[in-house]
Every structure is written in C-alpha cells, then in structure tokens.
Amino acid sequence: MNKEKYLARIGYTGPLEVNLDTLAGLQQAHLFAVPFENLDIHGGPPLHLDPEGQYDKIVERNRGGICYELNGLFGWLLQALGFEVVFLSAQVHGADGKPGPPFDHMALQVTMDGEGYLVDVGFGDSYMQPLRIGSTEAHRQGKDVYQLRPEGEGVLLLRASDSSEVAASKARPVFLLSLQPRPLAAFEAMCRFHQSSPTSHFSRKIICSKAIPGGRISLSDHILITTEGSRRRTQRLATEADQARALKQHFGVVR
C-alpha cells in the first residue's frame, strides 16, 4: 500500500486526521475518481479478493471494480490511515422489493468515538457521504434522500426522492445490512457467483459508472448515459472502438 499514490489516484489533497470530515472527503473523492465497473467479468482475468491485486488494478492500472474490489481496497486505505474498519455483508433488494442472498454486497463500517458509520464506494448510484448507523434521520444527498432503519439484527437502507416519502413509509429498500463483522474471505463465494452465473446481472452486460458533479455518467453495454440534475442524455456507441474510446475519455479506463 502506497498511501500517497492511492490518495493521488482519487485526487484527495485534504487533511488526514481520523475524523468524520476526513472520512466524508475520502469517500466523495473516491466516488468521483474510481468507476464502478465489471469489465474483467467480460473477457478479463478472474476477480479475486486479494488486496495487493486490487491495489495493482485500481491504483497502478487506473481501473475500477465491483463492490468487493472497491470497498475491499478502500477499507485497506482507511485502515492504513488509522481508521477502525470492518467489512459488512448486505442483501441487495431487487425490483420486486425482496432481498437477495447474503454477501451479495460488501460495505464498510467505520467506527469513531463509539459511533459506527456506513461507508460505501462500491454501489454505483448511491449515497455519497457516510451514514451514521445508529441514527434513523433522513439525509438528502444529491437528488435522493437516504435513511437507515433497524431491521431485525441489522439495518435496512432506504432511498426516496424526498422526505415526505420517508415519512409516509414509501421509501424503497436498497439493501439489508448485517452488522456482523466479516472477514474478507467470506465474500469469495459470491464474488465467484457474480463472475460466472448467468443469473448475475454483472455477467449479462458491461457496466461502467461513476459520479460527476451534479450527476452521473454510465456506460451500459453500448449506451452512454449522462445525468446532470434533471437532464438526461443518451448516446449509442455503434462499435467496439466507440465503446473503448468512451471508456478512456470518460472513465480513464483502458482494457
């Protein structure tokens, strides 16, 4: 781990004291700099939960990754900077509102002054700032409102377009988070599943996406989608060469 090189990769030049402001700044910088992408699932080398391999891919080779890679490596950086970090398993809710399998998603819990914060740089279009796990307060971040609600022995992440939906219990479930700390190796089986199973949405199409000021830019197979505020633009990329140019131009990714 070369901390200075990792911080340069995400363009972070702020303070490094172990506090909430630093944590929030690091999370936001990471989301603006490092894309969520599954390109290696489509013709690349297998994904592994090896921190040194993740560092080489994301920092040295200027790539992105899926949640196990992005949050796995970001957790290592935070630990190297002095933060207390554990890995958490989440069950992602599908379009039918039902939760998926355990270990479907990896998130981070960072603990400071006895308070746990949910931190995530590997869930695509989602919250940009840490969320305090013990709080049920609704937080607007960008165009959406997020809330954590106790659910059994875990917490449920909810998302809504405004606070009135939260108050009326109309917020949409995003994922159900277990608060049981997990070793990195516990995510290995689901990491293999998402690479190889035809039922995994990662194996069905190419995805590359990252936050931009005021919105998001995403590549979904041969469609480039740019969202800025309420404005949404789409562009069809006719050839593999067009796709490769878009990956390099908008995400800094060369396969």
Image (cartoon, helix red, strand yellow):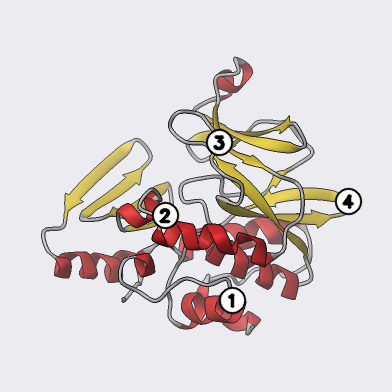
Label 1 to label 2: alpha-carbon separation: 28 Å
Check disc 2 and report the residue beneath it: 212
Helix, strand or loop for disc 4: loop
Check disc 3 and report the residue beneath it: 99
Find residue 114 and name its label. 4
Label 2 to label 3: alpha-carbon separation: 29 Å
Q: Are marks 4 and 3 in contact (CB under 8 Å)?
A: no
Residue at 63% across, 18% down = 167
Dot 2 amino acid type: Ile
Q: Earlier in the sequence, mark 2 or mark 4?
A: 4
Label 4 to label 1: alpha-carbon separation: 29 Å
Badge 1: residue crowd in 10 Å (few <14, some 14–19, many ≥20): some
Badge 2: residue crowd in 10 Å (few <14, some 14–19, many ≥20): some
Dot 1 amino acid type: Asp
Find residue 50 and name its label. 1
* Location of residue 124 in the rendering, given as x and y in whole percent from the top left corner: 46, 51
Q: Can residue 115 be seen in this view?
A: yes
Residue at 51% across, 82% down = 56
* Location of residue 149 in the rendering, given as x and y in whole percent from the top left corner: 70, 31
Helix, strand or loop for disc 3: loop
Helix, strand or loop for disc 2: strand
Label 2 to label 4: alpha-carbon separation: 33 Å
Helix, strand or loop for disc 1: loop
